Amino acid sequence: MASSTGSYNSPCAACKFLRRKCTPGCIFSPYFPPEEPHKFANVHKIFGASNVSKLLNELLPHQREDAVNSLAFEAEARVRDPVYGCVGAISFLQRQVDRLQKELDAANADLIRYAAAATQAPPPPPRHRSAVDYGRGGGGGGGFYNQTPSSFTFPYNYHFPTWNGGGVDGNI
């Protein structure tokens, strides 16, 4: 039971891991809360508690939090990838950025090519048909009215419905 004159503070993750009493001036307590024991365990495993303590004591107080976050990130990376650590993650992300940059460059090149093709030569104007083209003159068949529906060309995608009855020769 806690005494009425003081409040009970649980030891920081570092002191709990090292099985020592956590003093009020503990260098680890502001940066390794008791709720995150794995954070200190990884840092201790990679860098050692003594080295981390020396490093934190050499830094100014406003620099310590960033240093601990960097150490924790590097330690986590080293636990996941003992050979490359953070460098492996950075290399992976750099390759991903390079790949995405190439995809973006290719897409931009396609856009430029499509824009240039659209602005270059406009399509030729439609040809005026003569009476022969419409099957009214002599000259043997094949006129406009004798085409099958699938041979018509339109400037947009249109699919003819299936026709019931009627033939190519115009008999309905």
Image (cartoon, helix red, strand yellow):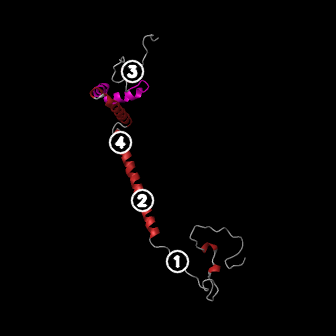
Farthest residue to the left: give it.
58
Amino acid type, mark 1: Pro
Amino acid type, mark 3: Lys
- How far apart, in angstroms, are the residues tagged by discs 1 and 2? 31 Å
Local crowd size for mark 4, using a 10 Å CA cut-off: few (<14), some (14–19), many (≥20): some
Sequence-wise, the earlier of marks 2 and 3 is 3
Proximity of marks 1 and 2: CB atoms separated by less than 8 Å: no
Q: Residue 88 bears which disc, if any?
A: 4
Magenta region: which residues?
32-55
Nearer to us of marks 2 and 4 is: 2
The image position of residue 24, as x and y in percent, is 36, 18
- The residue singled out by tag 3 in the image is 16
Above or below residue 3? Residue 31 is below
Nearer to us of marks 1 and 4 is: 1
Amino acid type, mark 4: Gly
The image position of residue 87, as x and y in percent, is 33, 41
Above or below residue 10? Residue 38 is below
- The residue singled out by tag 1 in the image is 125
Nearer to us of marks 1 and 2 is: 1
Nearer to us of marks 4 and 3 is: 3
Q: Quadrant of residue 18?
A: top left
Local crowd size for mark 2, using a 10 Å CA cut-off: few (<14), some (14–19), many (≥20): few
Residue at disc 4, secondary structure = helix
- The residue singled out by tag 2 in the image is 108
Quadrant of the snapshot with the C terminus: bottom right
- How far apart, in angstroms, are the residues tagged by discs 4 and 3? 31 Å
